[in-house]
Image (cartoon, rainbow, N blue to C red):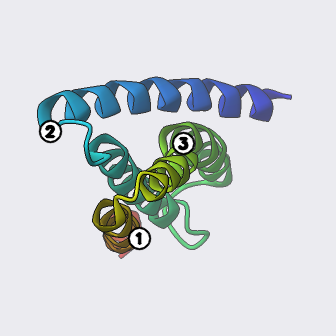
Amino acid sequence: MIAYLWVALGGAMGSVARFALNGVVSDKFGAAFPWGTLAVNVSGSLLIGVFAGLALPEGRLDPAARQFTTQFLMIGVCGGYTTFSSFSLQTLNLLREREWLYAGGNVLLSVLLCMVAVWLGFLLGSVFNSTK
């Protein structure tokens, strides 16, 4: 039962962080292109990569810390923080508005930048987790 509490608490924290960052970025750069969602997805991909690297079974974390990292940080915080459902709806809306360039740019940038971010995060987490 405690696992559900950790996931729920992390999800709430991630959702609030997503709301805050999306608002700040959208206020600064405007809403014509979903820059806030892109910033959240890229930073969330970086974070989940770091946590995944830290939670490797052969790393420094003991089983309890690994379980906490997985439940609270990866499933809870990152799950509540990242916004691929928002990304999908915003891309659909751009397509419906015939904003082909923005829609394509959102898909391309989101996938490429998030893949690079999760890879870099995983490398960073793995370095911190190295037992050598």
Q: Amino acid at mark 3?
A: Leu
- Name the disc covering residue 111, or none: 1
Q: Is 89 displayed left or right of 16 in the figure?
A: right
Q: Amino acid at mark 2?
A: Phe
Q: Residue furthest left?
A: 28
* Residue under label 2: 29
| Badge 3 element | helix
Closest to the observer, 23 or 49: 23
Q: Going 58% across and 44% down the picture, which residue do you hit?
A: 79
Disc 1 to disc 2: CB gap under 8 Å: no
Disc 1 to disc 3: CB gap under 8 Å: no
- Name the disc covering residue 73, or none: 3
- Which image quarter is the C terminus in? bottom left
- Find residue 71 and report its image quarter: top right
Number of other residues with Cα within 10 Å of mark 2, as a class: few under 14, some 14 to 19, many 20 or more = few
| Badge 2 element | helix
Q: Amino acid at mark 1?
A: Val
Q: Going 35% across and 66% down the picture, which residue do you hit?
A: 100
Q: Residue furthest right?
A: 1
Rounded to the nearest angstrom, the CA distance separating label 2 from label 3 is 29 Å
Q: Going 34% across and 74% down the picture, which residue do you hit?
A: 112
Q: Nearest to the eye among marks 2 and 3: give it.
A: 2
Q: Earlier in the sequence, mark 1 or mark 2?
A: 2
